[in-house]
Structures are given as C-alpha cells and as structure tokens.
Image (cartoon, rainbow, N blue to C red):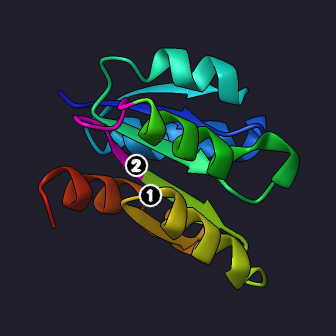
C-alpha cells in the first residue's frame, strides 16, 4: 500500500481528501503544516500539497525539498485555485510532478495519485 502525505491546512477539505485517498487504497496521513509535512514525507511515496493558501507555503516547501534532494523517491501533486494560474506556473517551476485545479483533486484525487505513482 502506497503511503501518501496530504499537506492541507483546511482540515475540512483535508479530511475529505484523506477519505477519498484511503478509499482509493492508499495509506494517507493528513498534515496541517508545511514543516510537519516535510518531516512526514520521509518514507512516503506521494506528497499532496494544497497551494490555495499562499501563507501555507506549499510551493516553497517543495522547492526546498527539491534543493535538499528529498524528492528523489517522492512524487508530488499540488492543487491550486483555478482563478490563480500563476500559482500553477510557480508550482511547476518549483518541481511539482503534477499540478491540478482544486476541483479536479476533489473529483479525481485517488485516480490522480494512482496514475502519478504508476508513472503516468
């Protein structure tokens, strides 16, 4: 069973995502802070990061992890507000493997995780 760390400060949305990932067959851990997510991601297969809250620092988190060599065996999936395409561009530049709108992670979270972990 693949381990997924979901770094989502919005606990209501985070618990919904956690439930969807768990139902999809993943061992999911919900984390509400970027610092805790970085520590929890050690040994995980996938890090899902909420990019809708600029104060959370999701782009900076993955950028720092990449610079420290912590993404070698960790896939990353970010989700952003569709009205902020500049966030998608920044996340892609920071090294995210996949960045999708929040509405899509809401509908297809487990499927996106499975495809990403399968190398698609």
Q: Secondary structure at mark 1?
A: loop
Q: Residue at x 33, y 62 (%)?
A: 112
Question: Closest to the observer: 20 or 87?
Answer: 87
Above or below, comparing residue 21 to residue 103 in the picture: above
Does the magenta segment cover residue 73?
A: yes
Say which residue appears at 57% left-offset and 63% top-offset. 91
The magenta-colored residue range is 69-76
Alpha carbon separation for disc pair 2 and 1: 5 Å
Q: Which residue, given by chain and number where applicable, does mark 2 sit on?
A: 76
Nearer-N-terminus badge (2/1): 2
Q: Which residue is mark 1?
A: 96
Query: On the rendered structure, is 94 left or right of 25?
Result: right
- Please state which of residues 69 and 45 is positioned toward the viewer in this rendering: 69
Is residue 17 visible to us here? no
State the image coordinates of residue 51 (x, y, percent, origin top left). 69, 56
Label 1 neighbour load within 10 Å: few <14, some 14-19, many 20+: many
Do the residues under discs 2 and 1 have CB atoms within 8 angstroms?
Answer: yes
């Amino acid at each position: 069973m693949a381990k997924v760390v979901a770094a989502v400060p919005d606990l209501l949305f985070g618990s919904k995502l956690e439930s969807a990932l768990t139902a999809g067959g993943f061992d999911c851990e919900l984390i509400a802070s970027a610092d805790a997510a970085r520590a929890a991601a050690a040994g995980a297969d996938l890090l899902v990061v909420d990019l809708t809250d600029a104060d959370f620092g999701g782009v900076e988190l993955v950028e720092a992890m990449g610079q420290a060599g912590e993404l070698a065996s960790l896939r990353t999936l970010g989700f952003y507000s569709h009205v902020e395409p500049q966030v998608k561009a920044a996340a892609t530049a920071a090294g995210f493997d996949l960045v999708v709108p929040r509405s899509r992670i809401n509908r297809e979270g487990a499927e996106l995780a499975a495809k990403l972990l399968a190398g698609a």
